[in-house]
Image (spheres, rainbow, N blue to C red):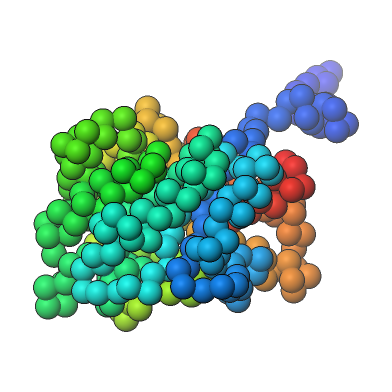
Amino acid sequence: MSNMFPVSRPRRLRQSPALRSVFQETEFRLEDLVLPIFVEEGIDDFVPITSMPGVNRIPESRLAGEIERYARAGIRSVMTFGVSHHLDATGSDTWNENGLVARMARICKDTAPELLVMSDTCFCEYTSHGHCGVLHGHEVDNDATLINLGKQAVVAAQAGADFIAPSAAMDGQVQAIRGALDAAGFHQTSIMAYSTKFASSLYGPFREAGGTALKGDRKAYQMNPMNRREAIRESLLDEQEGADALMVKPAGAYLDIIRDIREASRLPLAAYQVSGEYAMIKFGAAAGAIDEARVMRESLGAIKRAGADLILTYFAMDIARDGI
């Protein structure tokens, strides 16, 4: 008579914490995390971002102290976003050698030279209209914006940024930035492209965080969230243009895209756990619906499991404080 009981028993490897730990397939480390920060000029105290509990706008005057705190905690990388009080139609403060983009990079590197500084390279927080480039009528002029992105990238590199991270979603932006950096002698400055950036509803809290003046949306230049093949194409184009690393943004709802791009490219791949993803976990935990620490770790582990090498997350300091 045939044996009625299973021959293969996967549960054997789940019986104890030691077994589960030994056979865990995916790990993430603090070193895999990048902390996005918001720095506001002209203010004296931290400004809580109500839609992102635990996240504040950092006064520029106190940025050095915060960078010291992050470095002591073991944070290895930050992504800088500026909240500017010098807005105009083109975001020209971003290519001012003494503007906020340059000052943020300079403060970070002067304070903690070993910290990797990734400079978000865009215009939405520096334009009076809140769009990511030069407006002609109601449309963003792609090629005019490319010129300005190159200028911003050079200023950030001069100030010490290790990575230029273009998020403007313009066609050809990596090529334009690589050309500008190389022409200025910054051959060693890397580009982390926001190579697959979706026009996502999950960015909502970021508008409060960054103080953007946008009315309307960015669907004419950011990607349709329903397009999978186009997502791969966008990242491969950035690779061809000279990107040193790629990125998928947002992360949690786009694990299939992370996996697709991981299989299509050998470049390092980042994924951005965006403000809405962070807020949902925070508010869900506050309502008693979920365990914040466990869901936070599970969500980050899922992003890593999908194929991301780096994860940009507002939870980075929580992980630094409490451990993996």
Image coordinates of residue 163 in percent, x first then y, are: 38, 41
**4 or 124, which is in the foreground?**
124
Farthest-out residue, top: 1
Compared with 187, 102 (above or below) is below
Quarter holding residue 14:
top right
The residue depicted at 69 percent of the width and 68 percent of the height is: 284
The residue depicted at 62 percent of the width and 43 percent of the height is: 71
Image coordinates of residue 7 in percent, x first then y, are: 78, 21
The residue depicted at 73 percent of the width and 66 percent of the height is: 285
**182 or 304, which is in the foreground?**
182
Compared with 178, 94 (above or below) is below
Compared with 92, 232 (above or below) is above
Residue 241 visible? The answer is no
Image coordinates of residue 170 in percent, x first then y, are: 22, 55
Quarter holding residue 2:
top right
The residue depicted at 36 percent of the width and 53 percent of the height is: 102
Give the side of residue 34 with respect to residue 235, left or right: right
